Image (cartoon, rainbow, N blue to C red):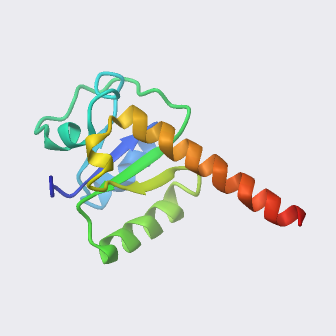
Amino acid sequence: MESKMILAYGLEQKDLEVFKMSNIKYKVITTKIFHEKIEAIVEKSEQEEREESLPKEKVILFNGFSDDELDKIIKLIRATIGRSPILAVVTDTSKRWTFEYLVEHLIEEREWYKKMQEEKGNN
């Protein structure tokens, strides 16, 4: 599962163009594969037919990139797509999760972090 690629969920076509122009391999997470395990999504060789994903969130997962590569790609994303996407790296643990479960986990994590920041601000 060392294939370098981005798994993109909820992004608009103009956001995906950033990856195309930078020659970064990516897959769009669609309704068809939303419930599959991340390792299965990465290992699929063909690109799924383009269909509307389920955007309530924008999520970008990084698979197989070095720290230096991640640093450059995240700077590119921040400069072009902005700060709205949830960014995460696929780990040995998360690759066994379904994409749906990981997105739920990341949203919970973000909400917990926001709550902690608010509580810190109120003290």
Q: Residue at x 60, y 50 (%)?
A: 110
Residue 91: x and y in percent read 30, 56
Q: Quadrant of residue 21?
A: bottom left
Whether 46 is drawn above or below 19: the answer is above
Residue displayed at 46% across by 36% down: 10
Viewer can see residue 55 = yes
Please tell me which residue is depicted at 50% across the width and 46% down the height of the picture: 106
Residue 16: % across, % down: 38, 46
Q: Position of residue 26 (x, y in %)?
A: 27, 48
Quadrant of residue 23 within the rendered picture: bottom left
User: Seen from this angle, which residue lies furthest bottom?
Assistant: 68
- Residue 27, given in percent of the width and then of the height, sits at 27, 42
Report the front residue among 53 and 119. Answer: 119
**Residue 12 appears in the picture as rendered:** no
Q: Relative to 53, is 98 on the left or the right?
A: left
Image quadrant in which you'd find residue 118: bottom right
Apparent side of residue 46 relative to residue 116 in the rendered image (left or right) = left
Counting labels gives 0
Could you tell me which quadrant the C terminus lies in? bottom right
Q: Residue at x 51, y 50 (%)?
A: 86
Q: Residue furthest right?
A: 123
